[in-house]
């Protein structure tokens, strides 16, 4: 009898959560009644003191890959709405959307440049407090334009703007290391970490020259405005202070140990005008803070592995080991140069510690940091940074020496 | 009104479920405690349904613990 | 006289139930981490809490072992006399009821906050109370067997949520260690001990153990495993959320939302939710059982199971008006509630041991004279 009772209670206990979660779905989340928001942009509205949000919502009936033939419709809908706060603007969206917009599947949170320069504090709380938004969203700042224009940048090869932007960004992060992907969680965290300023992804509009060439197409569809997702946006506190270009972004990524791939172009040994490409395999880094006589000092140690990928002139590494070693040395110099570029712009132009040197000092020397933190802006500008780069070239691809072009006498 | 009808129904069901068993076993003391608890729960529920403000014991506990919390340097919501 | 509770439980069930009892507030609101200013030291607070709790758990167990087959309610009447003993019993009963009320409300709030914001909280509270009353009415044996199974599920789900967000973890968030001094650790340790003082429950469980001699061992295991699971949670939360770890209302739920391993594992928060419900159900069942037994023993009743359903109704109703809001509830649980339950546990233990000491002194003197 006890056993039977035990069984019945177990079944009851197991069923209750399932039923509860399902009724939740049934009562308010009919798939026909919702619109999945894929990215959300935040700007100042035209009205003083109001916020405008722009979302792009997937049109499920236009994405379906049914046999019935290609759908002519755009597979998404971009729509803006305003309110005094982000939440109000978000709720006001329901005046325009016949389906209930839902943020569960959103990928990007985009801030317009103007909005970000004014400080994003007033907009971010909603995104961590609202249960629909996942902390894994990527934070993006639109360069030069409003977020409302960037949110629905279209890309070739992907029907959905957010999917296209995500694809480009992921590839840039993994194979070029010239872009950053900062999740909402990381972004909010860094706002709270002492001695560390935030960066976010940078997105901009690219106008493509449109040309008409009807070859091979049944129907014309060109994308004349697309997006670019490289570089990074640098913040100080909650305010945008400037932009990092591709080189500077990779410099930042070297310091943070987040370089995963990319090409380093160096001068080939003998001939100065000929170049060689090195493919980055992987990299590691360590930021070691030191306090010498009360003055902070930072040592950055970067280690990088690469393969020789291409040379423009004849090249045979078997001739002498000096060739190989000097290539490694020039690779290290390039990396140093990239890091220095990022350091310089962060120190002198932004005066913003996007590398988190202050945080490293806080973690290692909390007592000294308490004294430093109030004047960290000046200290950061004056900070001595030593960069040590250790590189190693591993392989040279399928060929050892390059193809030699034999000069043929022509008389 | 509907809530009160519902409450009456719920508490009657509890009563109908337990009372015959108690009476069958002739547990008179149990019946008294049981009835007291049931009536207490029912009164509480009806008062809540009628939106009568009830004093929360949590408040009293807070008031009593206030000096200790202050001694420990813990900031509370009410202070 | 008929026996109130005829069930017997094994040492492992005893341990599992105790761990579930401690872990439940952690799976919902992690008061420890919500009440620390500089989160990186929270795991130290967990360890301090465990170090203080082990002697407490051992003392309660040893005391219960001196009175085989008697619960803390019964032997406090033996030690302190019928009047003072009953008063102390009432205070302990009050603590059991308060805990039941707190966790019922917390589970309801958790559901409303995390999953179904539009459903009235009453629905979840009634459902939980019904589930738990059903289990409690079936007796201790059934509750503890379920408790053991739920414990395994809970540990599995917890370990999954600790491991899977690995790509969001940054362990440098855990430094600097102890930079903010000991005063930073006082609020979390108080809240930890507040929850651990619910281990007075040991005094209700030991008499029903099938091998009481193992009770001390399993009580210590319970503290160690419970604290271990919490320390891990603390480390993972700080690694993933950094200084924002103390901003979450439901930290482990938010942690589970960080998991994204392909499409399949993205919705793991449903598993976390199921683990909440099950473990809270077991904890509430245990406390309802204990409260009913306590009432029965205080008023010399011969059956406890008839009291469970009305008690459940009282608890749901009280859960609604005890606290105004979630903020109110969280504040109470971690501060005033914690301090008051520490006081109750401390005073109970001191009184009982003092009475025991005096009794043995008198007996020894008598023995010496005779």
Image (cartoon, coloured by chain):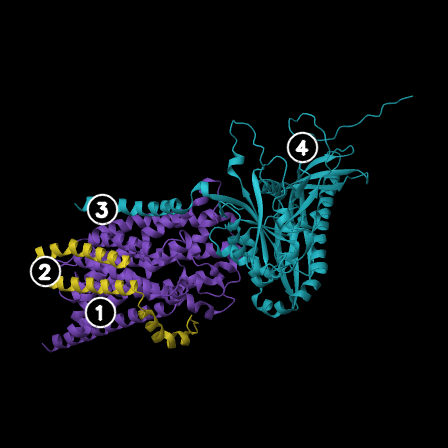
Label 1 in the same subunit as label 3 = no
Q: Secondary structure at mark 1?
A: helix
State which chain disc 3 sits on: A
For the residues labelled 4 and 3, say whether their Cβ atoms are less than 8 Å apart. Answer: no
First in sequence: mark 4 vs mark 3: 3
Estimate the spatial distance between the alpha carbons at disc 1 and disc 3, rounded to whole Å.
31 Å
Sort mark 2 into few (<14), some (14-19) or many (20+) by Cα contacts within 10 Å.
some
Q: Which mark is residue A358?
A: none
Estimate the spatial distance between the alpha carbons at disc 1 and disc 2, rounded to whole Å.
22 Å
Q: Nearer the viewer, mark 4 or mark 3?
A: 3
In the rendering, what colour is chain C?
purple
In the rendering, what colour is chain B?
yellow
| Chain shown in cyan | A
Residue A160 visible, this angle: yes
Above or below residue A40? Residue A403 is: above
Q: Which residue is disc 1 drawn over?
A: C90
State which chain disc 1 sits on: C
Query: Is residue C53 toward the left or the right of residue A124 in the image?
Result: left
Q: Horizontal and vertical percent for residue C147?
A: 28, 51
Q: Nearer the viewer, mark 3 or mark 2?
A: 2
Q: Which residue is more in the foreground, A127 or A271?
A: A127
């Amino acid at each position: 009898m006890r056993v039977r009772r035990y069984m019945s209670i177990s079944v009851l206990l197991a069923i209750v959560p399932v039923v509860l979660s399902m009724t939740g779905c049934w009562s308010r989340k009919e798939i026909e009644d919702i619109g999945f928001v894929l990215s959300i942009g935040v700007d100042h509205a035209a009205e003083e003191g109001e916020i405008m949000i722009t979302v792009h919502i997937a049109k499920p009936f236009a994405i379906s890959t049914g046999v019935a033939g290609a759908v002519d419709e755009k597979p998404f809908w971009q729509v803006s709405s305003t309110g005094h706060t982000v939440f109000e603007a978000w709720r006001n969206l329901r005046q325009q959307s016949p389906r209930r917009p839902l943020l569960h599947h959103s990928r990007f949170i985009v801030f317009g440049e103007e909005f970000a320069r004014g400080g994003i504090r007033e907009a971010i709380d909603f995104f961590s407090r609202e249960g629909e938004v996942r902390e894994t969203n990527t934070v993006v700042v639109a360069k030069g334009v409003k977020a409302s224009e960037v949110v629905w940048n279209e890309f070739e090869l992907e029907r959905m703007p957010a999917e296209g932007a995500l694809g480009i960004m992921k590839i840039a992060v993994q194979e070029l290391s010239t872009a950053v992907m900062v999740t909402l969680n990381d972004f909010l965290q860094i706002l709270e970490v002492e001695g560390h300023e935030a960066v976010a992804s940078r997105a901009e509009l690219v106008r493509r020259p449109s040309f008409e060439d009807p070859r091979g197409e049944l129907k014309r569809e060109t994308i004349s405005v697309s997006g670019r997702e490289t570089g990074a946006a640098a913040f100080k506190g909650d305010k945008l202070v400037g932009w990092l270009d591709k080189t500077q972004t990779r410099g930042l990524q070297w310091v943070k140990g987040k370089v995963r791939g990319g090409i380093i172009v160096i001068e080939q040994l003998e001939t100065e005008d000929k170049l060689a490409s090195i493919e980055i395999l992987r990299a590691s880094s360590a930021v070691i803070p030191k306090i010498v006589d009360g003055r902070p000092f930072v040592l950055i140690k970067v280690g990088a592995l690469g393969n020789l990928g291409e040379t423009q002139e004849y090249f045979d590494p078997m001739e002498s080991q000096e060739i190989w070693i000097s290539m490694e040395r020039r690779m290290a110099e390039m990396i140093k140069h990239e890091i220095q570029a990022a350091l310089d712009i962060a120190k002198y132009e932004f005066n913003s510690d996007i590398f988190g040197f202050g945080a490293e000092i806080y973690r290692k020397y909390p007592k000294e940091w308490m004294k430093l933190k109030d004047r960290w802006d000046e200290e950061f500008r004056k900070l001595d940074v030593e960069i040590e780069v250790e590189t190693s070239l591993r392989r040279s691809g399928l060929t050892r020496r390059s193809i030699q072009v034999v000069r043929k006498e022509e008389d | 009104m509907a809530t009160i009808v519902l409450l009456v129904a719920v508490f009657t069901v509890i009563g109908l479920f337990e009372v015959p068993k108690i009476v069958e076993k002739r547990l008179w003391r149990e019946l008294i405690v049981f009835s007291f608890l049931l009536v207490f729960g029912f009164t509480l529920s009806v008062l809540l349904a009628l939106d009568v403000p009830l004093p929360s014991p949590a408040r009293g506990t807070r008031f009593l613990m206030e000096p200790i919390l202050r001694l420990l340097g813990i900031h509370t919501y009410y202070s | 006289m008929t026996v109130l509770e005829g069930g017997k439980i094994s040492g492992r069930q005893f341990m599992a139930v105790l761990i579930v009892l401690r872990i439940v507030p952690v799976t919902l609101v992690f008061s420890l981490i919500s009440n620390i200013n500089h989160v990186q030291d929270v795991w130290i607070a967990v360890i301090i809490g465990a170090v203080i709790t082990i002697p407490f758990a051992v003392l309660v167990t040893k005391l219960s072992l001196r009175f085989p087959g008697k619960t803390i309610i019964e032997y406090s009447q033996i030690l302190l006399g019928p009047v003072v003993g009953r008063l102390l019993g009432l205070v302990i009963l009050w603590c059991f009821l308060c805990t039941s009320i707190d966790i019922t409300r917390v589970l309801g709030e958790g559901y409303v906050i995390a999953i179904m914001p539009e459903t009235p909280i009453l629905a979840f509270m009634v459902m939980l109370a019904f589930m738990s009353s059903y289990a409690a009415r079936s007796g201790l044996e059934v509750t503890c067997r379920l408790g053991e199974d739920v414990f395994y599920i809970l540990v599995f789900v917890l370990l999954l949520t600790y491991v899977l967000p690995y790509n969001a973890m940054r362990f440098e968030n855990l430094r600097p260690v102890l930079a903010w001094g000991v005063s930073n650790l006082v609020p979390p340790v108080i809240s930890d001990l507040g929850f651990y003082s619910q281990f007075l429950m040991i005094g209700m469980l030991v008499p029903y153990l099938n091998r009481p001699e193992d009770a001390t061992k399993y009580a210590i295991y319970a503290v160690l495993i419970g604290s271990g699971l919490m320390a891990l949670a603390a480390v993972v939360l700080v690694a993933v959320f950094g200084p924002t770890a103390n901003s979450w209302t439901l930290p482990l739920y938010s942690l589970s939302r960080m998991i994204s391993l392909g499409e399949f594992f993205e919705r793991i928060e449903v598993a976390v939710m199921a683990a909440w419900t099950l473990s809270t159900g077991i904890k509430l069942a245990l406390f309802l059982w204990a409260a009913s037994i306590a009432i029965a023993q205080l008023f010399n009743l011969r059956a406890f199971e008839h009291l469970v359903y009305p008690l459940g109704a009282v608890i749901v109703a009280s859960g609604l008006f005890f606290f105004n809001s979630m903020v109110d509830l969280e504040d109470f649980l971690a501060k005033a509630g914690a301090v008051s339950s520490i006081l109750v546990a401390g005073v109970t233990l001191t009184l009982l041991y003092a009475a025991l000491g005096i009794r043995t002194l008198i007996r020894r003197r008598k023995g010496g004279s005779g």
